[in-house]
Image (cartoon, rainbow, N blue to C red):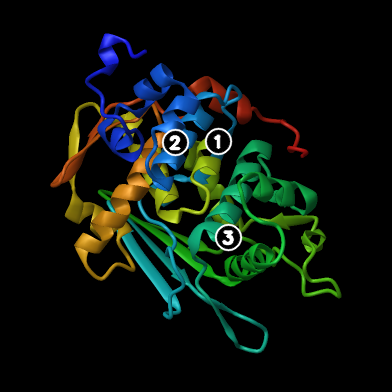
Amino acid sequence: MRNPTETAWPLSIGAEEALGGSLRQRLETLGIQQALDLAPTALDRRCIEATHLVLTDEDGTPNFVHAGFAMTALPHKRIDANEWVRDGADIRLRIESGKTHDGTTVGVPFGYVARLILLYLQTEAIKTRSREVELGRSMHSWLKAMGLNSGGKGYEAVREQSRRLSLCRLTFYRVGEGGEAVMNGGFVREAILPGRGKDSMQLSLWRETVVLDEVFYESLIRHPLPVRESAIRALSGRSMAIDLYIWLAYRLHHLEKPTRVPWPALYRQFGAGFALPRQFKAHAREALALTLSAYPEAQVRVDDEAITLLPSPAPVPERVRATATTPGRSPRRR
């Protein structure tokens, strides 16, 4: 039987509660199974599962990403152009497609898989304080834990994005009062994957290690942004949700007062690939619902004109971040 405080709630639960800031409370009141029984759509169920996954994550394992990716990001889908330029606040990101030895253009990295690979490389570099990152079984296991199918089409996507990431060139421009700061280089110093072997469908073909580009690594060490590993797992397959999560992880705990961000501003930052703002808004509302489900500490209010950001705890507490980045920590083994 419902208690009196529950009677005012609608008989469904999910994405709208995430957007309204009440999903965590309702889930804690109802319990996971009853909440799932009241979820009318797949998105609603996924939002409930995301909040439950993060709330029951006792370890709170952090991952790390360059803070520049909070203001700008890779494309969500394959693009025909050989150059990608995105602006965010005082940052501009330019990524140029690389070429193979015979001059074939490989394309700009894109989508969820490219983001996962980059997240793994950056996390390992921060945790070990080394440009040399272990791949092989460790990367295979981590990608699988993040929900990526390690065979068939999943592996081919990993191979394609690894190739693009290995060969591309990137430049971060930061404009400030003191002038323009430029970080120009690549992600890695050598290919993440070797050439095709006789059995090209096996992830054992990862190189044992890869060395990050020195310029990228030094910038990453200066500007690391902690995010929660369980949240990334909860956002599996949704590149825009990951971008929104990284953005909120960067912004919310630095705020001193409520800040409204109009939908047109979100469209300029995250809407590449959407011809019309209304198309972006419909897609972004779903992604934002899932993002807020995976970041239950976030205080964000959503209406038809804008989203309002309120001061909120960081997704990774400072004590957890400090433990994960203690100098001399040995590499993770999975």
Query: Mark 1 sits on what residue?
Result: 230
What type is the residue that disc 1 sits on? Ser
Q: Is residue 68 visible?
A: no
Query: Mark 2 sits on what residue?
Result: 294
Query: Mark 3 sits on what residue?
Result: 187
| Dot 2 or dot 3, earlier in sequence | 3
- Residue 30 percent across, percent down from the top left: 41, 20
Rendered image quadrant of residue 129: top right
Q: Are marks 1 and 3 in contact (CB under 8 Å)?
A: no
Q: Are marks 1 and 2 in contact (CB under 8 Å)?
A: yes
For discs 1 and 3, the disc positioned in front in the rendered view = 1
Rendered image quadrant of residue 278: bottom left
- Foreground pick, 2 / 68: 2
What type is the residue that disc 2 sits on? Ala
Could you tell whether 58 is left or right of 223 in the image?
right
> Residue at 21% of width from left, 62% of height from top?
277
